[in-house]
Amino acid sequence: MLSKPVKAILHALSYGGVEVEASRRLADIKKLDPMRILCKKLDTEIYNGEYQIPVRLYFASEEEMEQVTAAGAQAAPKTVLLFFHGGGWVTESVENYDRVCARMAQATGCLVLSVEYRLAPEYHFPVGLQDCYTVARALFLGQIFPKLNPEDITVIGDSAGGNLAAAVSMMARDRKEFRVRQQILIYPAVNNCYTEESNYPSVLENGEDYLLTARKLEDYLNLYQSAPSDRQNPYFAPILADDFHELPRTLILTAQYDPLRDEGEAYARKLKSAGNEVEVHRIEGALHGYFALGIKFLHVQESFEYINHFLAK
């Protein structure tokens, strides 16, 4: 249970809707991080038509970076996490998630590939999703690491990034261009409604006083959609899909005090009912967004224990 002083602080901070520029400036404060984790990384681009999608590679060790990037080498990393950041499809960036991805590479021993997909409202659905899918296709088809086994790639994302990860996996199944073997969805946004009409109790229970509010979630959806009809598209809201068969082996992590908690757990049940291998864990006492906190934070440590156990299977 959260203490009364903590609840009072959260209540004071949980106000207003989403004002795009102000929200982005607040998110960009992370770029000033004085505690940056030292990690070998490399920036490059992947083409989506004429647009170059920036991506950043985080290496688990200096030795791996030297092996993979050596001139003329055809070596591939052992395992890759293809990461899509959160931020309501509107804020955040690869740079803002620098510490998160550096920590992820070190904590898992995997190469992390983070995607700078285009944001709303400048680019509405499905532009950002198509950027993510294009990078995934290039990675799975060997255009980035020719000798990388597709079985050694895991798609992962948090919040809106969890939405994009789920949608990329579903799109890959439907288009049959490649197959995602496994995915990790961290407090994913997979539904299309955060008003009082929501079917999920956590929207009402946690939708006002826990930083991420139901009002903000509705604002994010309005900014992301190109038209109201998008909300019925399963690539916009994966939980609305008619068919959940032949989707990846999945790990879903939810947070106790998160309006997205129940839809993430419901998505896990839908995947499992369709015969997919699914593991789901609720992080008790956690708020939405906890994964971006420091490596010594207990909820983050608990999450990496689940992630590493899932990856080791």
Image (cartoon, rainbow, N blue to C red):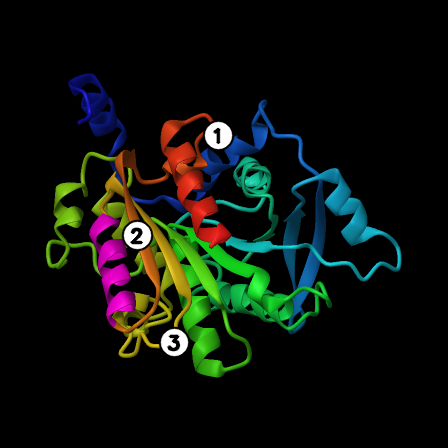
Q: Which residue position is annotated with label 1?
A: 295
Residue type of the residue flagged with mark 2 = Val
Of discs 2 and 1, which sits in the foreground? 2
Q: Nearer the viewer, residue 42 or 245?
A: 245
Give the CA separation, mark 1 to mark 3. Answer: 34 Å
Element assignment for label 3: loop
**Mark 2 surroundings within 10 Å by alpha-carbon count, few (fewer than 14), some (14 through 19), many (20 or more):** some
Name the element at disc 2.
strand
What's under tag 3, amino acid-wise?
A: Glu
The residue indicated by pointer 2 is 280
- Circle 3 crowding by C-alpha within 10 Å: few under 14, some 14–19, many from 20: some
Label whose residue precedes the other's in the sequence (1 or 3): 3
User: Tag 1 or tag 2, which sits nearer the N-term?
Assistant: 2
Residue 23 on image: x %, y % = 41, 40
Q: Which residues are magenta?
A: 260-273
Residue topped by disc 3: 246
> Is 21 inside the magenta-drawn segment?
no
- Give the dominant element type of the magenta stretch: helix, strand or loop: helix
- Residue at 33 percent across and 45 percent down: it is 18
Q: CA distance from mark 2 to mark 3?
A: 18 Å
Q: Is residue 89 visible?
A: no
Q: Is residue 99 left or right of residue 294?
A: right
